[in-house]
Image (tube, rainbow, N blue to C red):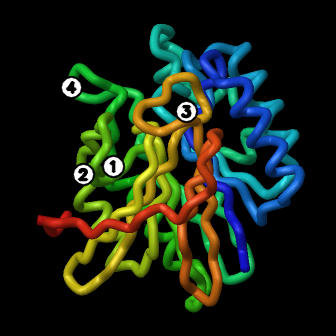
């Protein structure tokens, strides 16, 4: 059985120190096959926050891919935001949006953050045709029998969570990924876990959200997801920093066609 740790929204600068140490200890003790970090490593994209976050990622010492969240883009330095948005990731830039090829499993990145949008709230998601095509090309390159998972920061379709992503072109992207044979999309942003199956024109795909290891919790204690893959199928187990035992995340079915 392959095990992936899917973590998101650590928000260094507002991290829960106990939760961050707990996750690091579990990685060291249990040695998952890979870590997928689906964005918002920092709180304000400050240099000190990146230094702390990147040192933490390096200490994990397992195959890791990192998505960029909206909090990881400078909010106030517009020159840096538009011209050099990722430069503070330079210590581990090889991890940013890095595809992972594992035995029987392919992890494909999809960028959902935007340097600029024609709306007031730039924290929301956006999938451009260019970024979707890049992801679809990587999906097409995956071995034919591989389980393909896409990693991005914003949920493409809303889950039943208090926070929202309001991702532009998310429904179209989800439908295209489903048609391409993607089994699931691993996301963050909303700080609560979910696992929702969408049936789109005869193709089935799961939208999976991870919680947060920050102090900015909502309805769930600090948590991450453990993705357990066996025989081409997978379960998602939510693990929380609480007395509650780890449990398989209940899988919901979307009521409406997300591509409608």
Q: Classify 155 as above or below 201.
A: above
The 10 Å Cα crowd at callout 4, few under 14, some 14 to 19, many 20 or more, is few
**Mark identifier at residue 128:** 1
Instruction: Mark 1 vs mark 2: give the one in front.
Output: 2
User: Do the numbered discs 3 and 2 sit on residues whose CB atoms are within 8 Å?
Assistant: no
Q: Secondary structure at mark 4?
A: loop
In terms of sequence position, does the residue under pointer 1 or pointer 2 come before the other?
A: 1
Q: Is residue 176 above or below residue 77?
A: below
Tell me the number on the disc at residue 119: 4
Instruction: Find residue 35 and report its horizontal and vertical position in percent.
Output: 70, 54
Where on the picture, by quarter, is residue 4? bottom right
Q: Is residue 95 left or right of residue 184?
A: right
Specify the quadrant that holds the N terminus.
bottom right
Q: Residue at x 74, y 60 (%)?
A: 34
Q: Which residue is mark 3?
A: 40
Of the 4 image quadrants, the one containing the C terminus is bottom left
């Amino acid at each position: 059985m392959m095990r992936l740790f899917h973590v998101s929204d650590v928000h260094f600068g507002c991290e829960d120190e106990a939760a961050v140490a707990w996750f690091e200890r579990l990685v060291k003790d249990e040695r998952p096959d890979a870590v997928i970090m689906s964005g918002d490593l920092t709180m304000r994209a400050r240099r000190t926050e990146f230094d702390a976050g990147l040192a933490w990622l390096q200490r994990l010492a397992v195959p890791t891919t990192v998505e960029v969240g909206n909090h990881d883009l400078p909010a106030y330095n517009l020159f840096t935001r538009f011209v050099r948005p990722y430069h503070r990731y330079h210590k581990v830039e090889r991890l940013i949006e890095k595809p992972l090829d594992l035995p029987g499993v392919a992890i494909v990145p999809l960028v959902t953050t935007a340097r600029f949008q024609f709306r007031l709230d730039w924290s929301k998601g956006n999938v451009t045709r260019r970024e979707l095509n890049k992801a679809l090309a990587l999906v097409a390159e995956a071995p034919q029998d591989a389980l393909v998972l896409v990693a991005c920061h914003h949920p493409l379709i809303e889950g039943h969570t208090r926070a929202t992503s309001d991702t532009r072109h998310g429904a179209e992207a989800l439908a295209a990924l489903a048609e391409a044979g993607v089994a699931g999309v691993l996301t963050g942003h909303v700080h609560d876990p979910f696992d929702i199956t969408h049936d789109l024109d005869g193709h089935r795909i799961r939208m999976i959200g991870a919680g947060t290891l920050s102090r900015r919790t909502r309805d769930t204690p600090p948590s991450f997801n453990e993705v357990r893959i066996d025989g081409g199928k997978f379960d998602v187990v939510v693990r929380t920093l609480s007395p509650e035992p780890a449990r398989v995340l209940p899988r919901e079915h979307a009521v409406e066609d997300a591509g409608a």
